[in-house]
Image (cartoon, rainbow, N blue to C red):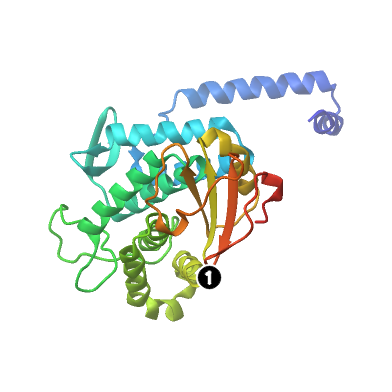
Amino acid sequence: MENNAERLASDFNMPVEELCDILENGRKALFNTRHKRVYPGKDTKVLTSWNALMISAFARGYEVLGNEKYLETAEKSVNFIFSWLYKDGFLLRTYKDGKAKLNAYLEDYAFMTEALIDLHQVTLDDKYLLKAQTLNEIMLEQFWDEKGGAFFSTGKNHEELIVRSKEILDHSIPSANSIAARNLLRLARLTENKDFEKKAETLFKVFASTFNKYYSGVSSLLCVLDSYLKPPVDVVLVGKSQQEIKPFLQKIGKNYNPDRLVYFLNTTKQDLSLKLHKEKVSLSDCPTAYVCQNFTCTKPVTSPDEMIL
C-alpha cells in the first residue's frame, strides 16, 4: 500500500502525506453517503439441509485437524436442529425468528442423516447413529416409491402435487437421491441391515439410464456407485471408552478414505449387536484395532502407529 501511495503521489507531484489525507477524506465521504442508502436485504432463515451440509464439513474438519471447536460447532448445530426443526416425529424445512415451519424435503432428511453418520464416525457416539437410523426410517416411509423405486423429492405429508418428481442431477448441492443412497449403504454396513443395501441397488437401477446420458450431472451418484462396487474397508476399535480409542481415531482421520467405516466395540457394555465383528477382542486389556477389507482382517494392534490403513 505504501509503495502504491508513493507511486501515486509521485505521479501527481505531491507529498505522500497530502495524498493519504485526500484519500482518507474521500473514503469518509463515500461511507457517509452510502450509509444513507437502504441496506441490502439479509437472508436470515435457517435451512435444515444447508446446515446439515455444514455439520458434515465441520465433522470432517474435526476428523482431520482435531480442532475441538469444529466438533463443538457440529454438535451444537445438531442440538439446534433437533430442538427447533424436529417436531412430532418429522423434520421441518426452515427456521426464522423463533419459528420453524414447512415440511422437510428429501434433501433435508438425506443431508441430515449423512451429517449424523459423519458425526458418529468421528466420535463413535451411538446417539448420532440412532438419530441417523430414525431419520432414515422416516425418509423411507415418507419418500420411497414402492412401485417405481428411488425417492421422491416430497414426502407423503406434503401438500398434494400434480407430479411428485425425483431429483438426481447435482446442482449447487449434491442430489438428494445420491446422498440418500450413500446413507443406505453406510447404514447397511453399520447396522447389518441388508434391506438398506437392496434399496440402494434398486435406486441405482432406476437411474441407470441417466449415467450414460448425463454422467457429468450425476457425479455424486456415480461416486456412491463406485463405493458400492469396491470391497468394503472396516476399522474395528475395541476398548472401554471413546476417550481410550481417541488416538486411533486421530490416526484414521489423517488417512483419507471416503469408503471406510469405523466400528466401536465397547468392552464395558458387551454389545454384541454387530454379528460380523462380535468376535473382536482387546489384547491384554488394551485398546485394540482391527483393519478389515473384503471380510479379511489384519492382525490386531494396540498402537495407532501399527495400523495399516
Amino acid type shown at disc 1: Lys
Q: Residue furthest left?
A: 160
| Mark 1 lies on residue | 230
Q: Position of residue 266 (x, y in %)?
A: 47, 41
* Side (left or right) of 127 relative to 102: right
Determine whether 305 is above or below 233 in the image.
Answer: above
Quarter holding the C terminus is bottom right
Q: Quarter holding the N terminus?
A: top right
Residue at 41% from the left image edge and 38% from the top image edge: 269
131 vs 238, nearest the viewer: 238
Q: Is residue 154 visible?
A: no
Residue for point 21% across, 57% down: 141
Relative to 79, say whether 32 is above or below. above
Establish if 150 lies above or below 179.
Answer: below
Relative horizontal placement of residue 305, taking residue 249 as reference (left or right): right
How many marks the image carries: the answer is: 1
Q: Quadrant of residue 178?
A: bottom left
Q: Secondary structure at mark 1?
A: loop
Residue 8 visible in the current orientation:
yes
Residue at x-position 45% and y-position 53%: 278
Residue positioned 14% across, 53% down in the render: 159
- Badge 1, how many Cα within 10 Å: few under 14, some, many 20+? few
